[in-house]
Image (cartoon, rainbow, N blue to C red):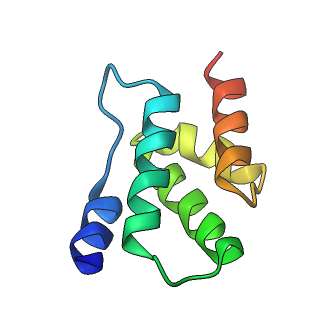
């Protein structure tokens, strides 16, 4: 089952009317299911990358990635700041 969730999280993209909070929650859920045996520190780093990739707007993703977030919550905070 973990392989199925890895595919889902890899292909996850933000929907046009979806909030960043909903995307964040879904990425967190999928990451836990996709990587159940990985240490929390590494899981956060992976989740952060997938969240930024899921933003589906390359310019917006670059702005978030430039701030070098280390955790998923950091990426969300930066994205919310830039979205305003």
Q: Quadrant of the C terminus?
A: top right
Q: Between residue 5 and residue 82, name the one nearer to us.
A: 5
Please name the residue shown 66% across and 72% down the image: 40
Please name the residue shown 30% across and 77% down the image: 2
Figure quadrant of residue 48: bottom right
Total marks shown come to 0
Give how far across and how far down residue 37 sits, in percent: 50, 84
Figure quadrant of residue 38: bottom right
Please name the residue shown 45% across and 24% down the image: 19
Give how far across and how far down residue 8 sits, in percent: 26, 61
Q: Is residue 73 above or below residue 16?
A: below
Give how far across and how far down residue 26 sits, in percent: 40, 45
Figure quadrant of residue 15: top left
Q: Quadrant of the N terminus?
A: bottom left
In the displayed structure, does residue 42 sit left or right of residue 9? Answer: right
In the displayed structure, does residue 63 sit left or right of residue 37? Answer: right
Q: Between residue 49 and residue 1, name the one nearer to us.
A: 1
Q: Is residue 38 above or below residue 58?
A: below
Residue located farthest toward the top when viewing the structure as drawn: 84
Q: Between residue 83 and residue 45, name the one nearer to us.
A: 45
In the displayed structure, does residue 53 sit left or right of residue 60? Answer: left
Give how far across and how far down residue 72 sits, in percent: 64, 52
């Amino acid at each position: 089952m973990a392989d199925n969730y890895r595919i889902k999280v890899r292909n996850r993209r933000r929907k046009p009317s979806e909030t960043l909070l909903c995307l964040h929650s879904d990425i967190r859920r999928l990451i836990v299911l996709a990587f159940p045996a990985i240490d929390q520190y590494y899981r956060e780093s992976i989740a952060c990358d997938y969240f930024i990739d899921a933003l589906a707007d390359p310019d917006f993703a670059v702005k978030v990635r430039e701030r070098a977030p280390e955790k998923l919550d950091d990426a969300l905070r930066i994205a919310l700041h830039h979205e305003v």
